[in-house]
Amino acid sequence: MDREPGEAPTLFPAKVGEKLRDARMAQGMALGDIAARTRIPLRHLEAIEASDYSGLPSPTYAIGFVKAYARAVGGDEVALARDLRAETSGMFAAREVYESYDPEDPVREPPGGLVWAGAAIALLLVVAVGLWYGTDLFRRGAAPDPAPTAGPTAAPVVTPSASPTPMAGGQVTLTATQPVWLRIYDADGQRLFEKEMAAGERYDVPMDAKGPMINVGRPESLQVTVNGSNVPALGPAGRAIKDVPVSAEALMVRGDEPQAGATTAP
């Protein structure tokens, strides 16, 4: 990636994104492999290779992503980070602009008449409250309080509420929070779905599938919902799972206990 000794300098030196792309292609790796290793969204990796950092919120994110990319392809992350700082020195502008305030500015001070009017209203309110609670001046002519009636009063009858019944059936939806490969199949071994899902992609498990189950390498990369409500993760983070039921009935009763068939990810 760095220029060899004795090599003539080029008129337009390669940018950081081009160096990373050349290193990746030299190793025969796809951009999705880098995303799987670094867990950086694919759209950010594509922007880095295109030297387009406008979609990143700050130079800190850009430098962190470039360092992770460099480690994945065996590059010099320190040198690449230094080149990126020079390349994007004038790209990221300040996000906040603070307005100076002069306390002596008369325009910002409330007029004196408004201050005296507010004080007079507050004083009148205090006097009115004192007259209401301290005298009967405002209570003359009011109807007397009704006399209490003797005799026992019937206690309210409390009816027990019916316990909720567990939900039967429902739509199971799997949403990828980051790139992840998974396979869905039914109890007869028939494949229903198998691919690498991109971040944000979702899949609805057929409601009429017979005992659907899942194999996935990173269960923490999936958000599972039943009828739009979140359910616990399919397995612990960093551990592959196999033959885990994903029907609505199984997900509603599985709880937080580890599922059978979980195996250690290679």
Image (cartoon, rainbow, N blue to C red):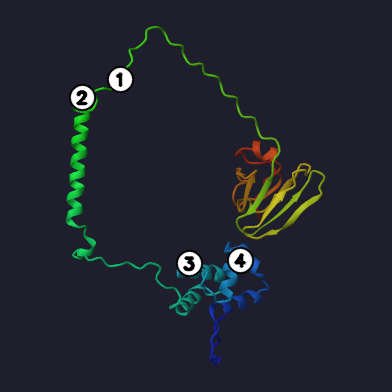
Q: Nearer the viewer, mark 2 or mark 1?
A: 1
Q: Find residue 146 and report its horizontal and vertical position in percent.
A: 33, 15
Residue that badge 2 annotates: 136
First reached walking from the N terminus: tag 3 or tag 4: 4
Q: Which residue occupies 18% across, 54% down?
A: 113
- Foreground mark, 3 or 2? 2
How packed mark 3 is, by other alpha carbons closer than 10 Å (few <14, some 14-19, many 20 or more), is few
- Does the image show residue 234? no
Amino acid type for the residue under numbered disc 4: Leu
- Tag 2 or tag 3, which sits nearer the N-term? 3
The residue located at (37%, 7%) in the rendering is 150
Callout 2 crowding tier (Cα within 10 Å): few <14, some 14–19, many ≥20: few
Residue at the outermost top position? 151
Distance between the Cα atoms at labels 3 and 4?
Answer: 16 Å
The residue that mark 1 highlights is 143
Q: CA distance from mark 1 to mark 3?
A: 68 Å
Residue type at numbered disc 1:
Ala
Label 4 sits on residue: 42
Q: What residue is shown at x 31% (from left), y 17% (from top)? A: 145
